[in-house]
Image (spheres, rainbow, N blue to C red):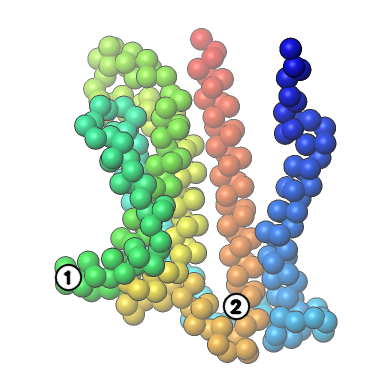
Amino acid sequence: MAAPLMDIAVSRNGRRVLNVWFAVLLVFLYTPLALLLVFSFNDNNLPVFPLRGFTTNAYEAFAANEELRASVVTSAKVAAVSSLLAVLLGLLAAVVLVRRRVVGKAAASALLLSPLVVPYIALAIALLVFFNEASVSTGLSTIVMGHVVLSIPYTILILVPRLERLDVRLEEASRDLGAGALQTFRLITFPLVLPALVSAYLVAFVLSFDEIVVASFIAGDATTFPLYLFSQLRFPTLLPQVIAVACIVMAASVLILVGAEIARRVAERRLLGEQAAP
């Protein structure tokens, strides 16, 4: 009988190859971001080597640029509202997909997740045509609606696995003890899915804050942060400010996502401990 073939992925050489490939992937992904950070402190209007010297003029100019700061505030407002709506709708959809028997559930799930595979440019054109036909003036409200469409699939993908991991007997026990559907959701389901809700909100927030393709079609007179950055790339004198604020947003996004993931894991461990205690 022939000896079973060893799985290459779990062999010693296989692990080494995977580790090297993972390191190469990290370098490929994060080297441009590291260069962006270096050039934000370079005393030169153009991001080129050799470096001329260390300076914080770009960050000081960003702090004094009212238009740039206004675009950041606009993007933050749009992201806050669209993320909240996306999480609410995603939670309702996730509850239906996991806890209810619905005819055509597979088709409904594919339809809800379709923005993940449809090109953003096609979605942007479709939204623009829809708003024009519906006589809706483009602006902040239309950007919010467009970003909700883009963010709902991500919230569903985060919330559905969390709901599937919850023991349905907890909800059944709550109803057996006399609690209604809303009371069961408020006292049992909601606290258990809260870490996933926070993660879904933050992911949707970052996605909305950085989105430019859909916003460029339906923004109207509104100017979000990505739109402002793209419009200012034509002017070399403003490029250092653009690089500086990009570094600030990048650092804030990383801190928010890392903090959310740590908080989610801590909350899940606490909830699992509480469930295992009895």
Residue 194 spot, x, y in % from top left: 44, 36
Residue 37 spot, x, y in % from top left: 71, 69
Identify the image quadrant of residue 184: top left
Q: Is residue 19 left or right of residue 178?
A: right
Identify the image quadrant of residue 88: top left
Q: Is residue 60 visible?
A: no
Above or below residue 273? Residue 40 is below
Of residues 196 and 46, the one nearer the viewer is: 46
- Alpha-carbon neighbours of circle 1 within 10 Å: few (<14), some, or many (≥20)? few
Q: Which residue is mark 1?
A: 133
Q: Quadrant of the N terminus?
A: top right
Q: Residue at x 79, y 43 (%)?
A: 17
Give the tally of numbered discs.
Answer: 2
Above or below residue 30? Residue 212 is below
Q: Is residue 131 left or right of residue 45?
A: left
Q: Is residue 218 visible?
A: yes
Residue 171 spot, x, y in % from top left: 34, 19
Q: Residue at x 73, y 19 (%)?
A: 4
Residue 57 spot, x, y in % from top left: 70, 82
- Alpha-carbon neighbours of circle 2 within 10 Å: few (<14), some, or many (≥20)? many
Q: Is residue 271 left or right of residue 159?
A: right
Q: Which residue is mark 2?
A: 242
